Every structure is written in C-alpha cells, then in structure tokens.
Amino acid sequence: MTEKTHAAGTDLSANAVTVLERRYLRRDKEGKVLEAPLDMFKRVATTIAEAEKNFKTGRVPSELSKEFLGMMTSLEFMPNSPTLMNAGRELGQLSACFVLPIGDSMEEIFESIKQTALIHKSGGGTGFSFSRIRPANDVVLSTKGVSSGPLSFMNVFDAATETIKQGGTRRGANMGILRVDHPDIIDFIMCKRDQTVLTNFNISVGMTEAFMEAVEKDQDYDIINPRTGEVATQRSARKVFDRIVDLAWTNGEPGIIFLDRLNRDNPTPHIGEIEATNPCGEQPLLPYESCNLGSINLAKLITDDQQVNWDRLAQIVELSVRFLDNVIEVNKYPIEQISEMTRANRKIGLGVMGWADMLIQLGIPYNSEDAVELGEKVMKFINDTAHAMSHTLASERGSFPNHAGSVFGKRGEQIRNATCTTIAPTGTISIICSTSSGVEPLFAVSYVRQVLDKDILVEVHPLFEKIAVERGFYSQELMKKIAQVGTIQDMTEIPEDIRNIFVTSHDITPEDHIRMQSAFQKHTDNAVSKTVNFCNTATRDDVSTVYRLAYQSGCKGVTIYRDGSRDMQVLSVQKEESRPEDTVPRETGKQRVKRDRPRALSGSTYQMQTGCGPLYVTINEDQNGLFELFTTMGKAGGCASSQCEAIGRLVSLAWRSGVQARQAVKQMIGITCHKPAGFGENRITSCSDAVAKAIQMHMVQHGEDDVTHANNGGACPDCGGPVEHEGGCCVCHACGFSECA
C-alpha cells in the first residue's frame, strides 16, 4: 500500500516527502533540512497572498493565504517547481518558462548566453529560435569571413548550461527551434543523431503552413536566407519531412512545432511574433517573456458518488488564477527586460494533472470516445472559468498593460492575463501529488523500484492496488508479474472491466494519443505538452502518420518516443531477457559464478584524451564476448591512475559475471570531472567517460549495436530509479529528477 506521511496538515506519500526533502525544502549551509513540507506550503501561500497588498481592492492576505494553503495541502493544485522552491526566499524567482531572443550579431548572441546563465542560475528553463542566425558559410561582411551557422552557437549555449547546473537543485534545460525554411535545416534535423551532444537541449523544427501544404502536394518549398530575406534555393518538402520522421523514429528528436498556428493564437501580435517555446513545448512566448505555471489535480475532484465535482473544480480554477496572477506581482525576475515584458502581458498557464487517474475513478478507458469527449468538456470548463476569473481580476486590478492593440483590446474585452491556460508535463509536481502526469495515460500499472538479487521491490499504482484488494484478486505474485510484463491486457486473472480502464501508454494507439492531445488543445490558450508513445516495432510510416494527424487535428506541436530507440531507455517494468546459455552467468542458489580466464585472449587498445592526459584502454574478449578491461594512464601514479585501474577491475568482474557491455557504458558515460564540454574529438568529460566511450568504439568496430548515444543509461542519473518519457522529457518518479526541469 502507498505509505503516507505523518506530517500535520498534509496528505503526502513517503515518496513525495523524499522528493521534497531532496529538491524543495530550505536547507542551511551544511545541507540540513530546515523546514517540513507543511512549512514549505505555508511559506508559499503566505508569500503569494501578500501580493494582495498591491491592490486597493485586494483580498485580506491572511485569509487568502489559508485558501492557498488549503488547495496545496489537499493536493488539489500545485504551482510550478520554482514557486515551491523560491517563494519567500532570497532568490524569489518563481517562473519556470522563459524565451530569449537570438540575433545575428556576435554581440547579440553572447548577450543571450549571459542572460541564459542568469535564468538557469535562478531555476528557469529557456527557449530560443536560432532562425535569425545566418547559415553556415554565409558571408560575414565585417570580417570578410564566413559564418559558422546556428549549430555552432547552439553548442556554446549547451556548454554554458552544462557549467551552470543551477546549484544541483534544478538542472538547466533549453529548447532549440529552427524554422524549416532555414538553409541549415538538414544539419539541424540531424544534430542530435549522436545523443552525447547538445544534451541540455530539446530540439524542434518550426513548421510553416506553406511547408505542410508542400508536403501534402509533394512539392518543393522555398529556403530563405535570414540575413537577406531572399530565397536561397528550394527543397523537396516531402524529403525534408521524411528526414524529420526518420530522426524522430531513430531517437525521438526533433519534435515539431507549427509556428503559424502559434501566431494564429498570439494575443499580442502588435508586440511581436512568437518564434519559440519553453523546453517542453507547451508555452509559446515572445522574446523576453516568461510564464508561471500551475496545475489542478483532477484526480482529487471526484465526488463520493464518482462524478466530476464541477463546483469544487470551479472554485479551484478561480483561486488558482488569482494565485498565478499574484505570482507575477511578487516574482523577482533575473533580467529587467523579462520583468517588463512579463508584467506587460501577464501570461499565466493553468493546466491539469491526474487526468488518467480521474478517468480510472470514473471507470472510463483512456482510449475511448467517452474519454475524449470528457477531456474536451473538462478543459473547456477550466478555460472558460479561468477567462471569467481573469475578467474579474481585470475589473479589480485593470487589464494587462499591452491590452490596447491586443486581440482582446480590439474586441473591447477587458482581461487581466493575455493567456490563462497551458497543459504542462507536471513531472515532479505530479510526484508530489502522487498522481498521473499532465494529460498522459499511465505509463505502467506496476513497475520495479529496485532489484536485489532476486528480490523485486514493486511499486503498484494505488488505485489498482485498492481495487485489486477490494475485488479479491490482489497478490504479491501478480504485482510482480505485471511489473515484468508491463501491461495487464492479456492477464485473464484480472477482470475485463479492470483491464479496460487500466490501460498504459503502450496499450493505446498513437492515434488515440493524438486524439486526446487534440481534445485538450481545443480549449487551451497556449499548447499541450504530451508524448506520443510508440512500441519498438513501430515504423517510420507510423511516425509520419501521427505527425500528419497532429497537424490535421489542430495540435500546435507533437513529440514522439519509440520504445527502446534511445539507450536512455524507459525502465518502468522488469523485463527478463533470454540469452544464449553460454553467455548467462551460472547460478547456484543466489551465488553467481564468473567465467574463468583462458591463458590467452585477443583484443584492442584505444587511446582516449582526458583532462588527466592520455588514457589507454585495452579490451579483451573470449569466445563468449567481452571479458576484461585494462587501463594505463599516460601520467603515471596519482589518484587518476589508481581510479582508472579500479574501474578496469570492476568492469572486468562485471563482464565475467554476465553483465552486458552496454550496461557498463550506461553507468559511466557522461560522468563529469573536468571540462563540461569535454576533451578531444570524443568530448571526454572524465576518465570513466573515456572508458565508456572506448567500450562503445570497440563494440561498433566489432559489429555490435551502436550505442554512441547512450547517456546515463536506462536509469535515473541521480538515484538509479526508472525513468519515463512524458511531455518530451525524461522524468524519474522515484526522486523527482527531470531532464527538462
């Protein structure tokens, strides 16, 4: 059963408390936690309620803070992570989403890099369009030289992000967007084929209506030089589209964003054009805009007789809109231009989480017409109520300053916030609320938390566990079986009605994913962050179909992930793999028996350039595969040499005991010791990273699978727990790590 805490006034799971202690609660200089979860919620509620003092018609802060506290401790609403972390503290930066402009001059580019560092240091994520940078090999009049192009500068932004790391609380994350009509678009599409580069970026191609029409008609489209604004050449739209599909099928990137669609819904076109979004794609923003987000936990809004609690939902929406508008008032922005633009448009992004859990409680399968219809109804109710509340706030406080000339101003509609709703991934805050993320389906009914010898610790969805006990089919053996298989759809020992409602992301079709995304998008001001999950056997044509369907059904963008297409594999289930008998470690009871060493072995030696000097890695094989690894450091003696020797011994022992090579790679690759950007042509970041990349080189040269895109393996780099792909991002539900936080 899900373990609850004993903290007064909260209903948090033990896992939620762990996440809060690791990432959110105040600490002293020695790292000692200084507040309990309830103290954190009180700190946030009090700080945000204090904004009422800025308005003549404001609520009484002490009374309002109790209402804010109530909806957070009841887990009915949760603001984005920076608000929980920083409200009432010295830093005071409360927004998650930022977009910065990138011009075509060296001065503009490096000014944006500096501003990016300040935003990441404060806990925010940044989005950029690199479309204004002239293409590679284009003329540079001031120096009579040639341009290095947008990709070279993306690497500089990536290195800066790697360096900041935000003090270990929230890691930097970026979205890089390039228009599909930019001359360097093919290089951009291909830039993350190697997953060891641009590791702090999600990338998306900015699609245009003209391009999509050309794809459908199999025509060429114009490629435009951003420096001159002139047509440079033409390309086959179908071939470029197929290249995007191929790379997305290969490893999930790039995603796609429909730029014209974003600007169709731009509420302030007189202020500027939308060119970019936040790192997960759900928040389109103008240059120098930020947005603070919050999410309503739909799983908490069910009545005792299993109906949607519309009255309470309306109350939470109204209170949440006031909360998010107050955040803008008390926020301490890292850059003055951001403060000015954010306060001028006052965009907020109220979204949802717990959608899959709400459907389960209502007995509605996620992949059903009823679910799609209810999704559209729920989001329309939230959006309409949010806009009504923003109208109320406008009567109390005035409309947003850029109202004149906006779409609202032109139709005489007073409103406080230029946008009100956004569907975010909610990775970490959904863990705090012990609910499903955003509008995603369940990823698994049961998954492995830890494996010790043959003892499997299984995490079971609390609603499934509750129903299984009530209906009399619960057993530990069944829970372990579900964790191993990953789906309950073929388990006849589970009643059919239960199998129907506990569908996971791989039980439903990609088309069903898009239908649900489209249903919520119809009544969302900004965009919907969602991942369309494919099984490993999905084809490129399947991906192409989903991209076209996303365009046709009104989505503003889409991200896909094909299971197993990255070595950063989603490991939410325990899979028992069958291997040839002679490659599996022999077991006697629980005792593993390692392979004996023959008198002679053959192998190869690789020279790797590290920050400690050249490292020589020798890899030997026996008849069953990789057997042992030796290291020699060019600089004799010292810690580096002894640590490399220890790595070699442990890797050798692991291989001789049956551990697969790629598992060793996953544990070591990407560990950083010196220069974050890496040394040498292989961008070596540490001695262990060098060993991992030497193993990769050896496997490729000997015809094994190419694992050059491995990055911290299939487990969370912080705690080793399972990671899930949701909203275009990897999230660990064990400790709260988020690739895009």
Image (cartoon, rainbow, N blue to C red):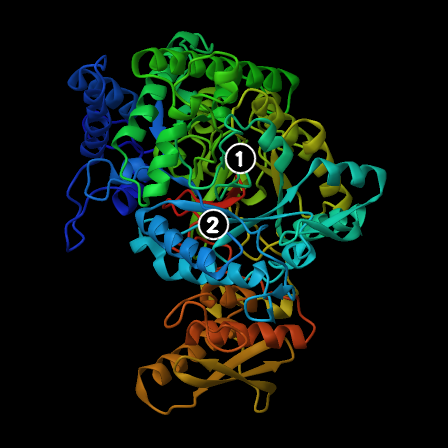
* Disc ID at residue 578: none
Judging depth in this view, the residue of 633 and 421 nearest the camera is 421
Q: Is residue 544 above or below residue 575?
A: above
Viewport quadrant of the C terminus? top left
Viewport quadrant of the N terminus? top left
Image position, residue 463 (x, y; %): 45, 26
The residue that appears at 55% across and 35% down in the rendered structure is 530
How dense is the environment of label 2, judged by Cα within 10 Å: few (below 14), some, or many (20 and up)?
many
The residue that appears at 52% across and 80% down in the rendered structure is 628
Callout 2 amino acid: Asn
Compute the Cα span from label 1 to label 2: 15 Å
For mark 2, what is the residue?
A: 174
Left-right relation of 263 to 53: right
* Label 2: element kind: strand
Q: Is residue 530 above or below residue 732?
A: above
Image position, residue 249 (x, y; %): 68, 49
Which residue, as the protein is rendered here, is positioned at the far right?
A: 218
Left-right relation of 602 to 175: right
How dense is the environment of label 1, judged by Cα within 10 Å: few (below 14), some, or many (20 and up)?
many
Image position, residue 165 (x, y; %): 35, 56
> Residue 633 occupies which quadrant of the picture?
bottom left
Marks 2 and 1: in contact by CB < 8 Å? Answer: no
For mark 1, what is the residue?
A: 529
Whether residue 546 is visible: no
Judging depth in this view, the residue of 712 and 622 nearest the camera is 712
Judging depth in this view, the residue of 239 and 625 nearest the camera is 239
Left-right relation of 220 to 111: right
Callout 1 amino acid: Ser
Image position, residue 413 (x, y; %): 46, 12
